[in-house]
Amino acid sequence: MTVLHSSALPGQPARHRVCVLPGDGVGVEVVEAVLPIFEALALPIDLDFGQIGWECWRTGGDPVPAETWVKIAAADATLLGAITSKALQEAEAELPEHLRNTSRVYVSPVIQLRQRLSLYANVRPVTDVLGEGRFRFTVIRENTEGLYAGLDFAAIPAEFEPVLKARELAGAPWHRDSPEDATMTVRLQTRAGLTRLFRYAFDYARKHGYPRVTLADKPNVLRYSGAFAKGILESVATDYPDIAYNIDNVDAVALWMIRRPERFGVIVAENMFGDILSDLGAGVMGGLGFAPSANIGDAGAYFEPVHGSAPAHVGQNKANPSAMFLSLALLLEHLGYHAQALAIEQAVAQVVKHDCQTYDSGGQATTRQCAAAIIERSVLNLSPLNPQTENGRALPARSHA
Ligand code: IPM
Ligand code: MG
């Protein structure tokens, strides 16, 4: 593994640069555990490490320091561990004295990355990694607007008062003693935002062999914004006559994801609905320890496990590194290292079922043991001598990319 970038000399194959941001808590542990794979697979990738997260906030008042933005911009892709986030007041209280009351506001670094870099598609594949490949679907979550657009108000903005009055007159009584007695959050959806998201979802379905795109929304309640999304979906769908599409209520999708996960292919959803459905998807997989994600835009991408920094488990070398390996596989796929990505995905499925189970699957393997087993398997899977069978059985089919 070479640290820091060196551009290819004439005649040498091009190298890629990956910015690695371990972040906080178990993020640091799982990143550390996967790093040896770059050398083990002889990947022509230079790693550039940067700082992000709670410690940066606590010491410098900025969870994404300026030099980290520069590193991200200079890289072909970014690998992120996990980040600790706390509520506004707690965040303020942890700042050093001289940075308090300076109108600094803690904004989750992942939300900053997604919004500032326009990483509009949050791709979260859900596979039967612990089972026999019974289901395989992907939640594609809108990542820059929707209910997480940042239009979350501590009190009703004055401009909205007439709207609330009209609502009351239309027969929805409500009570408020003072302005502090009500808050509101706006679901922002734009034609441009939904068009690029739906295009991404249809392209993804085509590329990964899924016959259908399902929009998980709530058009029977969110009548106008739901109809807006429906119109855009229908118009984008005309360019993909080979892919079927439908709109399901998000609550029903949640139910069926548990009852019949094999029913789904590509599920696309606005930001908050997709956030919730993708955690549900992680639950269907067997837990957050297995769920990877990719945050993709037209000019950048970062990859991270769906799990957080898990402060309760820090320092115990027990976090499941599978989600981190599968996120790395998504990154490698994105950069064009298809064979290596596949080798890692298969290795995770092989190892977590038979050899190496961390506490979240009822085992006692440590992060490092599990990581070492996955790395060893990945190398074996890539070996030309590998018969592509395991105990006489064919390896599981490619899960996703
Ligand atoms: C996720 C996380 C984040 C989100 C939080 C940490 C802001 O839950 O990536 O799903 O809601 O987007
Ligand atoms: Mg989430």
Image (spheres, rainbow, N blue to C red):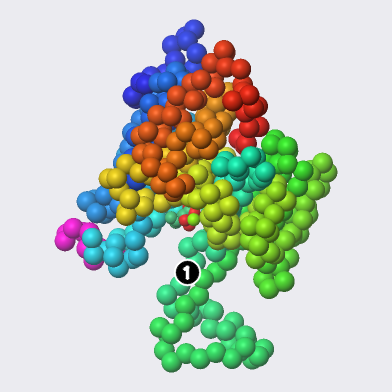
- Give the residue furthest to the top: 11
- Give the residue furthest to the left: 97
- Rendering coords of residue 172 (x, y %): 62, 88
Q: Main secondary structure of the magenta part?
A: loop
Is disc 1 surrounded by few (<14), some (14 to 19) or many (20+) residues within 10 Å?
Answer: some
Which residue is disc 1 drawn over? 152
Amino acid, disc 1: Asp
Q: In which quarter of the image is residue 98?
A: bottom left
238 left or right, relative to 310: right
367 left or right, relative to 156: left
Looking at the image, residue 386 lies above or below residue 106 = above
* Range drawn in magenta: 95-103
Looking at the image, residue 167 lies above or below residue 370 = below
380 left or right, relative to 19: right
Looking at the image, residue 360 lies above or below residue 345 = below
Quadrant in which the C terminus is drawn? top right
Q: Is the CB of the residue bearing disc 1 within 8 angstroms of ligand 1?
A: no
